[in-house]
Amino acid sequence: MKLWQKEIDVNQSVDRFTVGKDRELDVLLARADVLGSLAHTRMLESIGLMSAEDLSSVQKELKAIFANIERGEFAIDEGVEDVHSQVEFMLTERIGDAGKRIHSGRSRNDQVLVDLRIFLRRELYEVVTQVKELFDTLQSLSEKYKNVLMPGYTHLQVAMPSSFGLWFGAYAESLMDDTQMALAAYRICNRNPLGSAAGYGSSFPLNRTMTTSLLGFDSMDYNVVYAQMGRGKTERVVAQAIGAYAATIGKFAMDNTLFLNQNFSFISYPPELTTGSSIMPHKKNPDVWEIIRGKCNLLQALPNQITMLTTNLPTGYHRDLQLLKEVLFPALADIRDIVSMANMMLQNISVVENITTDPKYKYMFSVEVVNNMVLEGTPFREAYKTVGLNIEHGCFEAPTTVKHTHEGSIGNLCNEQIGELMDKVISEFGFERVEKAEYELAH
């Protein structure tokens, strides 16, 4: 049975094809759907479209359903089209006609819109929370190994001295920048589309400001046509934020696979975190980092996939949009798994010290020698030529230490400042206010 169904049964093949994975994926939206209905029904009562008695019954049962969802006891019954239908049928079954009133003033279009906004802002909260843990791990490692030198490369050729402090710290700062993109996505998610109905508003005197406040949104999507246009756009900007994190972590995964290679041997992991070969007993393969790298590559393609799914759709709702859940929801689970595994691996990493004493890294100190000569008064081009000739003639003497003092260099990592920037970005999300609003609605 479907909310919109009248006297004609839908062909079963059409039903299976059009519903697709909706029942499975909509379970993830159940929490958000109930929150939306809790706010919507309170608004309906305030404008005279629901009696105080009906509101009391509806609110009580919605909160009971919410508790079931939180305990993992909610399911969409066979034959029920989606989560919205399931919740309404459950209410009607338990409290009668009062349950039928909850759909007044809204359509499934804006119901799924508000569900997605509530769901996606929570998903972003969880992703950002996990990323902050990874960020903290990277910063801790950066401080721990700030004085341990390693080779830096350009064109995959040994170039200049770097340090493990710089390496870990670079990826921490990259995650901070990526979190700026997550913040932008969150701000777009945290706007209320509820009240746009089928995309053209309602003749009911809906109080959209009230539902915006009750649900903890920063503001609303004011224009009702634009609210519907947000479907696809919202998913795309969330995918772009996920893709930014994936680009950073994927690059870091590549570094790890490279540096674990015996020809580098810069780092190591406990044997239980690597895998072996079926015929080569000496192998310790970085499978975790390789899977992370592959998944990150796929996630970076997600914004384009969403763009291609929505690029030729005119104004209004179209069933194509249902497919967005099938590509975005698994991606959200993937990025959380990726961040979690990367953090776990890093908490068990060991770095190799005294790498740069190997003679093959001798010439990466050439710039240090050139700079020291310049500091002593030799013109740069002359110093460069002198050091170059010494290298060609085999008489170059490499220093054993480096002295880098400017901001962000080996001797001045600025991790504290980077940490402050990350804290500032995260504070701008306003997660606490949303948590408070949702709790007050559901309890």
Image: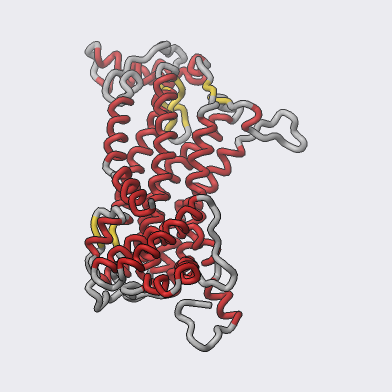
Residue pictured at 50% horizontal, 70% vertical: 93
**Residue 323, visible in the rendered structure:** no
Residue pictured at 28% horizontal, 55% vertical: 217
Report the number of discs. Answer: 0
- Left or right of 286? Residue 248 is left
27, 348: nearer the viewer: 27
**Residue 232 percent coordinates (x, y):** 38, 64
Q: Is residue 3 above or below residue 351?
A: below
**Residue 267 percent coordinates (x, y):** 54, 25
Pick out the residue farthest to the bottom.
Answer: 7
Q: Is residue 257 above or below residue 17?
A: above
337, 110: nearer the viewer: 110
Residue pictured at 51% horizontal, 30% vertical: 346
- Left or right of 326? Residue 103 is left
- Left or right of 90? Residue 426 is left
**Residue 18, visible in the rendered structure:** yes
Residue pictured at 23% horizontal, 18% vertical: 379
**Residue 349 percent coordinates (x, y):** 54, 26
**Residue 356 percent coordinates (x, y):** 48, 17
